[in-house]
Image (tube, helix red, strand yellow):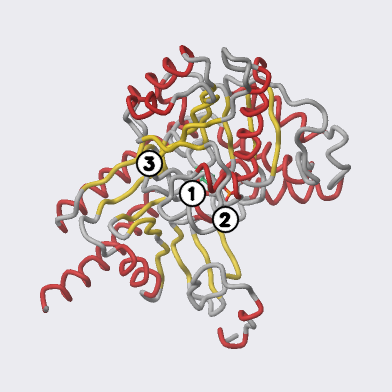
Amino acid sequence: MEFSQYRTDALLTITNRPPLVFVEGEGMWLTDHQGKRYLDYLQGWAVNCLGHSPQCIQDALAAQAKKLINPSPAFYNEPMVSLASALTAASCYDRVFFANSGAEANESAIKLARKWGQKNPNANGESRHEIITFDHSFHGRTLATMSASGKPGWDKIFAPQVSGFHKADLNDIASVEKFIGDRTVAVMLEPVQGEGGVIPATREFMQALRELTSKRNLLLIVDEVQSGMGRCGELFAYQLSGIEPDIMTLGKGIGGGVPLSAMLCKEAFACFEPGDQGGTYNGNPLMTAVGGAVLAALQAPGFLSSVREKGQYLRSELLKLTERFGLAGERGEGLLRALKLGRPIGPQIVELARDMGPVGLLLNSPRPDLLRFMPALNVSKDEIDQMIAMLAEVLETIAAAEAKQ
Ligand SMILES: *Cc1c(COP(=O)(O)O)cnc(C)c1O
């Protein structure tokens, strides 16, 4: 079928999409409406942690769809209970609330912090609700999570914002201290800023934050929607810094491609009362059965060490490209990595890579001078080599065009 035959104008425009309709996916590969194949380093925005349509997700969906799809969140169901207990066993948390998207899990964390701040007032007996977040952070697209985010321009588009968020600077503890007032209840951050350009919080900063928040009776919330579920080489990125935050949110990888997210907290902060929080689809067995299958795959012996190995390999190959093409280096944790281009050629690379033939390459440029790599966590070494070779070809093309000018 020709692209023009698809009635794409029936869709509300929310982003500029290329004229492609994807019809099939397998592992690291996607196929479009004309049968062209693409090596996919987006993976649904770091969502498909086991690649496209992995067998274990197909099986979990088929088996659970036959059994029970949704008895309502007013009742327990087996996959919901078993995934919650597996997540608490694998982390420092005691309680889990399931939702459908990262933004919704973060809304939940914000609500829980505000609730806790009502129950734990300041010295004047006033409830506390202010949350310190960070410049360039990304927490989602609901009004509250947009207000929590430090994305440039987001304070204006749907003004007025939800109030009570202050933006400190990542890896600068003094900038956090400066914003602590008698209404402050929490500090919330991504252990590795994803959309902001793959910027890791340092181990020292995470430890200083833990110390500061404990001392000042504030909650420490980690948004692990992107960094969690093995992406950074540990099951959860907070484990890289040897601290235990009070609240954690998960999304993206936890569903391996289906809509599932979670907010986890320690027992001491589990202060929601019946009626405070909910949602029609929350904890439905179809999605939580997938979450269970994904978590089991990530916990298989050797899986996370292979993520770390492939992260190191990707890193070393990106450094070779840096050397060869005079780029500005790379950064990241595990298989969440960025190549610093040193100049604003990111969007051009994305287009050239996608349109090259006979096989295309899908890349992401969250900032014009940066490429972000979010492969499936079970990507093969060969698929890393193929990507690097294709990217080198694109960089050659750009260098040749620049030389002619
Ligand atoms: C993607 C992302 C979100 C939002 O998740 P959605 O499922 O799109 O709502 C929140 N926080 C971080 C760190 C993310 O990367």
Q: Secondary structure at mark 3?
A: helix
Residue 50 visible somewhere in the drawing:
no
Residue 3: x %, y % from top left: 56, 84
Q: Which amino acid, by three-letter code, is at mark 1?
A: Ala
Q: Are marks 3 and 2 in contact (CB under 8 Å)?
A: no
Q: Which amino acid, by three-letter code, is at mark 3?
A: Lys
What residue sits right under mark 3 in the picture?
A: 310
What residue sits right under mark 2 in the picture?
A: 52
On the picture, is 61 further left or further right than 404? right
Instruction: Name the image quarter holding residue 162.
Output: top right
Q: Is residue 365 above or below residue 140?
A: below
- Front-most of 107 and 22? 107
- Front-most of 342 and 4? 342
Instruction: Name the image quarter holding residue 117.
Output: top right
Q: CA distance from mark 2 to mark 1?
A: 8 Å
On the picture, is 334 further left or further right than 266? left
Q: CA distance from mark 1 to mark 3?
A: 11 Å
Estimate how packed mark 3 is, as few (under 14), some (14 to 19) or many (20 or more) residues with alpha carbons within 10 Å.
many
N-terminal of the pair, mark 3 or mark 2, is: 2
Location of the C terminus by quadrant is: bottom left
Residue 142: x %, y % from top left: 61, 50
N-terminal of the pair, mark 1 or mark 3, is: 3
What residue sits right under mark 1 in the picture?
A: 376
Q: Secondary structure at mark 1?
A: loop
Estimate how packed mark 1 is, as few (under 14), some (14 to 19) or many (20 or more) residues with alpha carbons within 10 Å.
many
Q: Is residue 403 above or below residue 204?
A: below
N-terminal of the pair, mark 2 or mark 1, is: 2
On the picture, is 291 further left or further right than 135? right
- Front-most of 208 and 87? 208
- Mark 1 near ligand 1 (CB under 8 Å)? no
